[in-house]
């Protein structure tokens, strides 16, 4: 058997040309690189910090009549009374009518879910509050 053929069948494996596949992968990768910076993101603008000494406590503006506490177990307390997510909008509408100039203060426990904060933020925006203060405990 001098040749690699046996009964008319070629024993060499066919080669697969990977060049078109690699070209497509690179085109898709370049498309993602170009499009990624253009995507809109919900950004939070933070206030610029001053040159305060690290031991000086920051004074909080006058206490707002609208204080919202989010506990570690994701329960929401508005002005000391427990409110469910279903009743949140109606309670905020009531407070917006009675205190139209007030800025709500949010006390959010760091162990609470971010989804609770997002739902609360969405309700505040829906009701018509333009601002909110997020109070962080030391």
Image: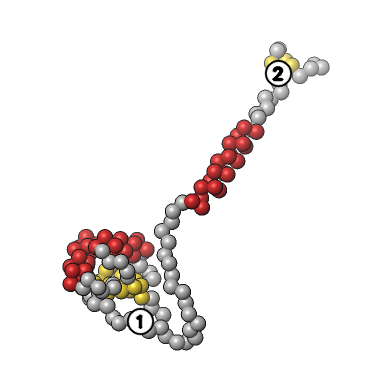
| Residue 89: quarter of image | bottom left
Quadrant assignment for the C terminus: bottom left
Q: Between disc 2 and disc 1, whose residue precedes?
A: 2
Farthest residue toward the front? 101
| Residue 118: quarter of image | bottom left
Query: Is residue 116 something one can see in this rendering?
Result: no
Residue 28 is situated, as x and y percent measured from the top left of the image, at 55, 41
Quick check: 118 above or below 52? above
Residue at image coords 27%, 78%: 64
Residue 133 is situated, as x and y percent measured from the top left of the image, at 34, 73
Quick check: 53 above or below 32? below
Residue at image coords 74%, 16%: 5
Query: Is residue 113 something one can see in this rendering?
Result: yes
Relative to 47, is 93 on the left or the right?
left
Residue 90 is situated, as x and y percent measured from the top left of the image, at 19, 63
Residue identified by numbered label 1: 60
Q: Residues within 10 Å of mark 1 (few under 14, many from 20)?
A: few
Relative to 46, is 18 on the left or the right?
right
Residue identified by numbered label 2: 10
């Amino acid at each position: 058997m001098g040749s690699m053929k046996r009964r008319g069948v070629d024993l060499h494996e066919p080669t697969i040309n990977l060049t078109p596949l690699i070209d497509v992968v690179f085109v898709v990768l370049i498309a993602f690189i170009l499009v990624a910076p253009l995507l809109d993101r919900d950004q939070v603008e933070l206030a610029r910090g001053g040159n305060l000494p690290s031991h000086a406590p920051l004074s909080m503006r006058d206490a707002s009549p609208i204080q919202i506490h989010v506990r570690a177990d994701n329960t929401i307390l508005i002005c000391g009374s427990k409110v469910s997510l279903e009743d949140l909008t109606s309670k905020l509408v009531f407070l917006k009518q009675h205190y139209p100039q007030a800025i709500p203060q949010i006390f959010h426990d760091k162990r609470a879910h971010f989804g609770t904060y997002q739902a609360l933020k969405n309700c505040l925006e829906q009701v018509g509050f333009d601002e909110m203060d997020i109070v962080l405990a030391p």
